[in-house]
């Protein structure tokens, strides 16, 4: 197998490939004078393109627009405008307030990223399948099918009814029409199950050598997530299938919880294979991806606290409501920075005026002071290697704790063993020194997912499934949300470019 350090090199090469990104411009990959008959002769040559698709999908885990719209509008993520004039973005404020319109720029950019990933996967698949060496590239073909299916999962999750395109080049005289969400669901399921046939199990590969490519278990995990949300997507519950997919991961015996949640997000997580099931490898020193959570999240004074080679931008924040979910002794509470701030040795972290920095909840959504907003230290800067402001912490897509909580929820909802579901939730809680639950409710499960998976891109999807997205209130959300806002509107520029696309119910066409 190709070693991880080689993947860094070919990732950089793959990212130099030019791809047109809009859904009406899904184009074939350009390899200069190379063609499928001469290019894909070896695994390394095939991976040079497949890794590029991985890099594009990583936007759902990094701090780019696909990740942002999975977190905006929830009770765990906001980006306030600053009194100094920075960070104000009307599109972001719209999402936070559940008032998104088809012209929303943040949602529009997310659409472009998602369909760029899908279009690139289509182009790579066509080239792989056309290669005379295709029979020896079954694993790479399976990876790319799974990557494309993942892209469509997010498109379906965010926008519902979207165009289903499986070719690299679209005839401008025959643009794709909208495909119903349930049909996209079936496509995602079919493609992921087909990919399982040729992907290796984590038990049959050398984890260090194969990392971070998809294994069967990564796709079992994706299917578990798909089935957990099946009722939202199709109107039909599929709890038993979700449980079966979780068991396919659990029964390998290949995964377990790390000693600490934070261990999954350290720069050294590249060497840990206990809990992480799927992730995106980054190495900014080789122009092969980056992690910018610290740059976008932390307060400017954290440059001194963590001896950073840059000044953080003090943007991404969380709510008091997110902090209040944790018990005082819960170790995960320590991942949120709030109140009086100190250096790592406990010395007060002081502002230019000599006063200690005290982080308080956001009070003004459009003109917040610099000390407003709690910070989620999802990816720690301690021990991180930097290339400018880019960190080398790998980006997490799926980990074992999510599988345990997914199985617990599916069991509980399907009237299975509440004792088994309770034990699974407590297994996650005990790792972080949270008190042991003696009984279980759906609210317990939702809140445990929020505590454990904060800022991992699950919260909006979870809140929609549990109904709290519509019925609950929190800071800056004081009333109920209309049911149609479970979907983002199809971006207006996409409908302008392709009149065959239908706008989602509740939104104006233009």
Image: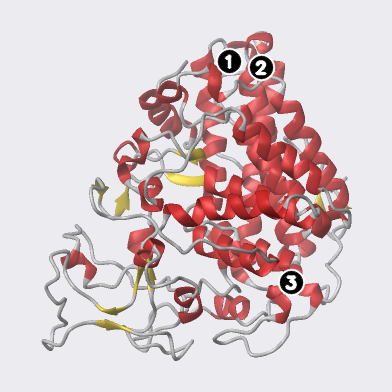
Left or right of residue 460, residue 42 in this image: left
Residue ID at (15%, 88%): 355
Q: Is residue 253 above or below residue 300?
A: above
**Of 460 and 16, which appears nearest the observer?**
460
Q: Earlier in the sequence, mark 1 or mark 2?
A: 1
Residue 328 visible (yes or no): yes
Mark 1 secondary-structure assignment: loop
Circle on res. 40: 1
Left or right of residue 146, residue 50 in this image: left
Q: Is residue 395 above or below residue 337?
A: above
The picture places residue 31, in percent across and down from the top left corner, at: 56, 26
Q: Is residue 466 above or below residue 24?
A: below
Residue ID at (54%, 25%): 202
The picture places residue 62, in percent across and down from the top left corner, at: 47, 53
Residue 28 visible (yes or no): no
Q: Nearer the viewer, mark 1 or mark 2?
A: 2
Residue at label 2? 138
The picture places residue 363, in percent across and down from the top left corner, at: 44, 91
The picture places residue 69, in percent across and down from the top left corner, at: 60, 65
Residue ID at (52%, 35%): 52
The Cα atoms of the two marked residues, 3 and 2, are separated by 41 Å
Kindly indicate the quadrant of the structure image that contains residue 448: bottom right
The Cα atoms of the two marked residues, 1 and 3, are separated by 48 Å
Q: Is residue 407 above or below residue 455?
A: above
The Cα atoms of the two marked residues, 1 and 2, are separated by 12 Å
Q: Earlier in the sequence, mark 1 or mark 3?
A: 1
Circle on res. 467: 3
| Number of numbered callouts drawn | 3
């Amino acid at each position: 197998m190709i070693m991880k350090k080689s993947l860094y090199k070919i990732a950089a090469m793959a990212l130099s490939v030019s791809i047109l990104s809009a859904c009406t411009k899904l184009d074939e990959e350009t390899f200069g004078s190379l063609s499928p008959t001469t290019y894909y002769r070896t695994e390394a040559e095939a991976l040079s393109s497949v890794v590029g698709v991985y890099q594009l999908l990583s936007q759902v885990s990094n701090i780019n627009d696909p990740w942002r719209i999975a977190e905006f509008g929830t009770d765990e993520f906001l980006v306030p405008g600053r009194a100094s004039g920075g960070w104000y973005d009307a599109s972001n404020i719209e999402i936070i307030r559940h008032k998104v319109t088809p012209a929303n720029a943040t949602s529009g950019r997310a659409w472009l990223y998602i369909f760029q990933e899908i279009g690139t996967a289509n182009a790579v698949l066509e080239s792989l399948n056309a290669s005379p060496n295709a029979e020896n590239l079954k694993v790479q073909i399976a990876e790319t099918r799974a990557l494309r299916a993942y892209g469509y999962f997010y498109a379906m999750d965010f926008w519902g009814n979207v165009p289903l395109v499986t070719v690299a080049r679209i005839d401008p005289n025959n643009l794709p029409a909208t495909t119903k969400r349930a049909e996209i669901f079936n496509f995602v399921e079919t493609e992921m199950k087909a990919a399982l046939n040729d992907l290796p199990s984590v038990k049959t590969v050398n984890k260090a050598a194969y990392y971070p490519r998809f294994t069967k278990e990564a796709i079992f995990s994706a299917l578990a997530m798909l089935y957990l949300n099946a009722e939202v997507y199709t109107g039909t519950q599929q709890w038993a299938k979700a449980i079966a997919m979780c068991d396919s991961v659990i029964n390998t015996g290949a995964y377990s919880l790390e000693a600490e949640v934070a261990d999954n997000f350290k720069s050294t997580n590249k060497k840990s294979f206990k809990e992480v099931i799927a992730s995106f490898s980054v190495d900014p020193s080789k122009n092969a991806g980056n992690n910018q959570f610290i740059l976008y999240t932390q307060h400017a004074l954290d440059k001194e606290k963590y001896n950073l080679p840059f000044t953080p931008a003090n943007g991404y924040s969380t709510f008091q409501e997110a902090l209040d979910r944790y018990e005082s002794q819960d170790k995960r509470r320590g991942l949120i920075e709030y109140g009086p701030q100190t250096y790592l040795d406990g010395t007060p972290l002081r502002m230019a005026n000599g006063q200690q920095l005290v982080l308080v909840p956001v009070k003004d959504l459009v003109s917040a002071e610099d000390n407003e907003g709690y910070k989620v230290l999802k990816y720690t800067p301690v021990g991180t290697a930097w290339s400018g402001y880019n960190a080398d912490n790998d980006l997490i897509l799926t980990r074992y704790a999510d599988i345990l909580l997914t199985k617990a929820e599916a069991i509980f909802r399907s009237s299975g063993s509440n004792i088994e579901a309770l034990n699974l939730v407590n297994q996650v809680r005990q790792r972080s020194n949270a008190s042991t639950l003696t009984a279980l409710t759906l609210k317990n499960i939702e809140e445990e997912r929020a505590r454990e998976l904060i800022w991992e891109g699950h919260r909006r999807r979870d809140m929609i499934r549990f109904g709290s997205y519509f019925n609950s209130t929190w800071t800056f959300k004081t009333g109920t949300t209309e049911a149609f806002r479970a979907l983002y509107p199809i971006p207006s520029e996409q409908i302008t470019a392709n009149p065959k696309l239908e706008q989602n119910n509740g939104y104006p066409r233009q």
